Every structure is written in C-alpha cells, then in structure tokens.
Amino acid sequence: MLEGKSIWITRPEGQAEKLKLVLEENGAQARLLPMLAIEPVASDAKIKALVLNLDKYDLLFFISTNAATLGMDLIHNYWPQFPDQLEIYAVGPTTAQVIESYDLKAEFPVERMSSEALLALDSLSDVAGKKALIVRGVGGRELLATALKEKGVAVDYLELYQRTCPVFTPGELAQLYTDDTPAGVVVSSTEALENFSALLARDNIALDCVPLFVSSDRIAENAAAAGFQQTITMSGADDRAIIDSLKTFFNSAPHRENDV
C-alpha cells in the first residue's frame, strides 16, 4: 500500500502519534514535523465570565480539536452538570470525539471539515434569535460568526489558545528534505501551510517540488497561491480520511497530482 513512502505529518505536537503508527503499519516511513504550536492562553475574568454564563447560550461551536480539548476541560470544571439546552456543533469527527468523551453529543458535517460545511447543516438553517458561543483560538476566520450573525444569531467568542510557528534553525528543514525527501506532506490547516511554506522558502526549497496532501479545497487554493504545484485534496482531516486518501493516490495509475 504505502510501502517505503516517506510521509511527513505537520499536525501540532501530541496530535499525530496515532496517525504515525497507522501509517507505519501500512509500510510508510512517517515523520512528525509539527508546523503549528498550540499555546493555551491564561484564563482571565472574561474567559471565566463566558464559561459561567454558558447556560445563557443556545448554540455551542468547537472549531478544532484543540478548541474542544481545552474548551471541554474548562467547561467541565465549572459545569459538571452540562447545560442541557445547548446544541453542540463540531467542525469534524475528530473534534466531535473529544466532546463525546464527556458523554455529550455533537453534530458535525460528514463530507467536509470546514466552517462552510458546518453552516450547511440543516439544523442551522433556522436559528434566528438564538445566541451562540464559538470556542476557538485567538484570531482566525470570521466566516462562521459572520454567517451566523446574518442568520440573526448573537455571537460571542471563547478564545483559549494561541497558534505559533515551531522553531527550526536555518537550514534544518533543507537537511531533513535532503535526507528524507517526502513522497507526501500532510497539511490540515492554513496556519500550518503558511508556516511550512515560509520555512521552505527560507531554506531555498522549491515549493513546486513538494507534494502536499491537504484536507480542504480552501487549503488547496492557498497552497496554489503560495506556489505549490503538486496538491492533492483529501476527503477530510481525520486519520481515516488521510490514510484512505494516501492509499488511493499511491495505488492509482498513473500517479497524477491535482493542480488547483
């Protein structure tokens, strides 16, 4: 299947070990190369007030696994009995699994892991007059909040972490690329893509030589704009989707990359 293929995984530290193991079980040579570091922000009066007022909201959104992990841990500290009026939404199945570990149910899009897919859910078609809390990192896309407001929803943010670029010394990535040229690099966030492309450029590695496997059309579009020319859009960002997409690509003939 993936015998001998070098696959680089750019997920944050601590979030790719299971995927690495499955890749290796399928014969790949998996390398963990985090292109995004997640740093929790210190809890302050604003964060505490938002969590204490959780029962005032109707809709609760988690836009990443990090948001669900940090958010549910914080919420559980204040709400051992979860407010039962809340409708919970997750951006994808992996994020939903975190919520389900607290014996709660979250609705999530099946086809794609994105804000656009989340907004397309039938249960969010008529939400005028409701109040939503979006759990996320500092900054990020405004699409979800903007679309909800257009539907008549009042929106607040619960921002629990910062995204930063891991430290690589000049030339470090170039040496890794020379020693272990990847058959594929898995990228599942725009921030990781931005950090990866910047580090490649700094080390004078041509972007058009790097084969990317990305988790959404939006990331594929950003990759094309950055200069990547070998980009394959996977069916999702969870482990199963990544493995299936890699197998399908490397076992197809002829091997052709999708330029986007």
Image (tube, rainbow, N blue to C red):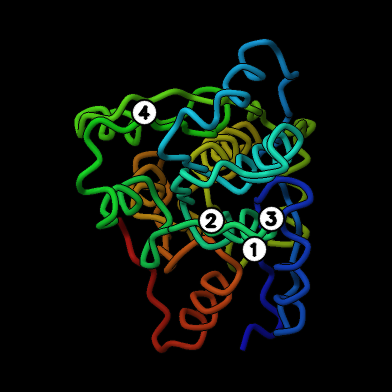
Label 1 is placed on what type of residue?
Pro
Residue tagged by mark 1?
182
Label 4 is placed on what type of residue?
Glu
The residue positioned 75% from the left and 31% from the top of the image is: 170
Residue tagged by mark 4?
142
Front position among marks 4 and 2: 4
Mark before the other along the chain sequence, 3 or 1: 3
User: Spatial distance from mark 2 to mark 1, Cα to Cα?
Assistant: 8 Å
Residue tagged by mark 3?
102
Label 2 is placed on what type of residue?
Val
The residue positioned 71% from the left and 22% from the top of the image is: 41
Number of the label disc, if any, that sits on residue 124:
none
Mark before the other along the chain sequence, 2 or 1: 1
Q: Quadrant of residue 254?
A: bottom left
Number of the label disc, if any, that sits on residue 210:
2
Spot the residue most to the top. 45
Residue placed most toward the observer, 153 or 167? 153
Evaluate if marks 2 and 1 touch, with contact meaning CB atoms under 8 Å apart: yes
Mark before the other along the chain sequence, 4 or 2: 4
User: Spatial distance from mark 3 to mark 1, Cα to Cα?
Assistant: 38 Å
Element under disc 3: loop
Q: Position of residue 224 (x, y in %)?
A: 36, 47
Q: Position of residue 37 (x, y in %)?
A: 71, 36
